[in-house]
Image: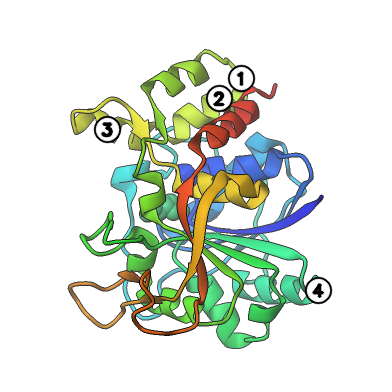
Amino acid sequence: SRKILMIDTDTAGDDCTALLLALRWPDVEVKAITTVAGNVPLPLCTRNALTTLEIAERPDVKVYPGAAKPLMRELFTAEHIHGSDGMGGANFPEPALKPEQEHAALAIIRLINEYPGEIEMIAQAPLTNLALAYSLDPSIAGKLKHLWVMGGANNFMGNDSPAAEFNFLVDPEAAHIVVHAGFNLTMVGWDVCQRNPVMVEEHFRKIEAMDTSFASFYMKVLKTGMELGLKRGGGRRISHPDTLTVAMAIDNRVMARSSRFYIDVEHKSELTKGYSLVDQNGILNKEPNAEVCLEADLELFREMVFSLLEQK
Ligand code: BDR
Ligand code: CA
């Protein structure tokens, strides 16, 4: 059956391969891409999304730039993981495609109202655009078919602070608003891509040998992230949380195990801001507000990525 997706992204590295997967997968319609400041400043996120559309040969898909900073805080970015251009230092030429004028938050509201119950949204970046859209029109929470959030972490597995994952840490207030908004929400946390290595040296060798334009794009945009593993003494490796989340939305079997829990996001403490609380033992006695992904089928995920990258 046909899936209608919308993707909110701070386009850099893994975000780009996530977009490529959705844009090229059969029976998937990408209604819109919305960009938000996160990995890199907003103009670069938008530019990288447009570059990805050109590589994917999908000039028909529209890109709506959104929030240039978190709701209440200053932006901090992650060029050390994604390269100064967010594309592994590949320095792609300025894309010919241009973004839309309409603000991402307004486009989100308009499209969800135009297609109630039909759109699945993947939020793979700080949740600023969604928090803004929800604040302007709370009715969207009940009209979105499914919200897949790549963010947070189950059981203290932070990456950008000991307590928090990057997307929740950049805009903890936005994350707090979104998890309590009443969306049909699935949380895919950082821990899901840390239990087992997602892509390692042997997989990169296979991809390098493919000799297709998508494979070469993949190796370029993930270069900085991959090589961080080398510095740390391991081989090249990539975690792929965003691409994994898109894969789950496209094929639910990729989410091998999940359960419904009450979740919350800390936004007041300096020490633990962005921390995602998952009440796994039901201690708070609150209605679950999220499906929490506990395990991914990495084998199936890799098959999907390989079949994407093999395309000529
Ligand atoms: C998330 O942070 C970003 O660096 C990645 O794009 C991903 O969305 C992982 O914590
Ligand atoms: Ca991202």
Measured as percent of width and height from the top left, residue 213 is found at 61, 23
Say what secondary structure mark 3 lies in: helix
Q: Which residue is mark 4?
A: 114
Q: Which residue is mark 2?
A: 215
Residue 27, by quadrant, is: top right
Judging depth in this view, the residue of 298 and 232 nearest the camera is: 298
Judging depth in this view, the residue of 165 and 253 nearest the camera is: 253
4 or 2: tag closer to the N-terminus = 4
Beta carbon of the mark 1 residue lies under 8 A of ligand 1? no
3 or 1: tag closer to the N-terminus = 1
Measured as percent of width and height from the top left, residue 306 is found at 58, 26
Judging depth in this view, the residue of 183 and 12 nearest the camera is: 183
User: In the shown orientation, is residue 292 left or right of residue 146?
Assistant: left
Question: Residue 212: which numbered mark, if any?
Answer: 1
Q: Are marks 1 and 2 in contact (CB under 8 Å)?
A: yes
Above or below 129: residue 211:
above
